[in-house]
Image (cartoon, rainbow, N blue to C red):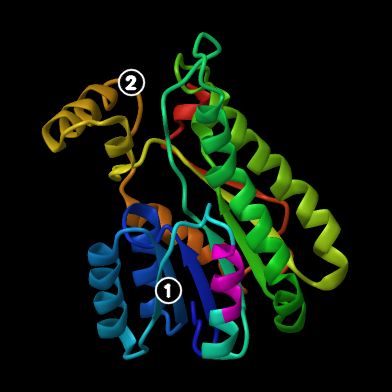
Amino acid sequence: MDFTGKVVIVTGASSGIGAASAILFAKCGAKLTLVGRNEQRLKEVAKKCHAAKGNQPLSLVLDLTQKGSCDAVVARTVVAFQKINVLVNCAGKVTIGSLFDDNINALDEMIDINLRVPYQLTHLAVPYLKQSKGNVVNLTATKYTRVRHGFLGYSIAKAGLEKFTKNAAIELATEGIRVNSVQPGLTRTNILSNLAMSEEDRRGAYERLSNEMKVIEPEEVAKMVVFVASDTCPNLTGAQMSIDGATSVM
């Protein structure tokens, strides 16, 4: 898959699936805007991307939930590269919460990063994706189809993102813009760090969870992301590309 001359924005690029996807896009020749909150990790990913094909990524250390951040991502990308071909909405977060909690902010936080940010970035990128006949890839999650205590807000947000993907695909089809989602199962990332778990505890959690579901590596999900974003299947839009080792059908 050749992305030479194409400009790709990857959010959540400082770790996990976002980082793996950015590095793979770079190996395929893409020019990249990398967005993340951890400056040191983002620098490390940018170095790997630069080493892949020699293109220097635009690295933006931003909290996308803050006012003006999404606008800055799109505006600075266009200034740097003059166009946008692909938007990968990979930034996300998990926090534990339920209807028994008094703090509604937990739900707002999940909706904000997991749903509102992809919506806003897509809205802002539409004029440039229209020009390039580009596409959007949203990272949803197969886990929301299985009810687990404590993940109410996260599940609502990810289910909303899937609905957004389908509706946006129809709405933007007349403009030649494709919109798809990649649905990874449990993936070995540092997203559990948001649950105040140590590195040792995270490793133990993945080991325990691997007894009931397949644990996917970020690099494998990245291959699906890059495939969906490529021109390999020009009529692929509104699709839900699941990669979870059949966990969702067990």
Q: Residue furthest left?
A: 200
Residue at position x 42%, y 61% from top? 223
Label 2 to label 1: alpha-carbon separation:
32 Å
Task: Give the magenta-colored segment's residue range.
Answer: 68-75
**Observer-nearest residue: 75 or 9?**
75
77 above or below 5?
Answer: above
Q: Which amino acid lies under the numbered mark 2 shown in the image of this protein?
A: Glu
Q: Name the residue under label 1.
A: 25
Asked if the magenta segment contains residue 71, the reply would be yes
Callout 2–callout 1 Cβ contact below 8 Å: no
249 above or below 81?
Answer: above
Q: Which of marks 2 and 1 is nearer the N terminus?
A: 1
Q: How many labels does the image show?
A: 2
Q: Name the residue under label 2.
A: 212
Q: Which of marks 2 and 1 is in front?
A: 1
140 above or below 143?
Answer: below
Residue at position x 27%, y 27% from top? 210
Q: Which amino acid lies under the numbered mark 1 shown in the image of this protein?
A: Phe
Q: Which residue lies furthest to the right in this view?
A: 174
Q: Classify mark 1: helix, strand or loop.
A: helix
Instruction: State the image quarter where residue 104 is shown.
Output: top right
Residue at position x 72%, y 58% from top? 237
**Observer-nearest residue: 34 or 31?**
34
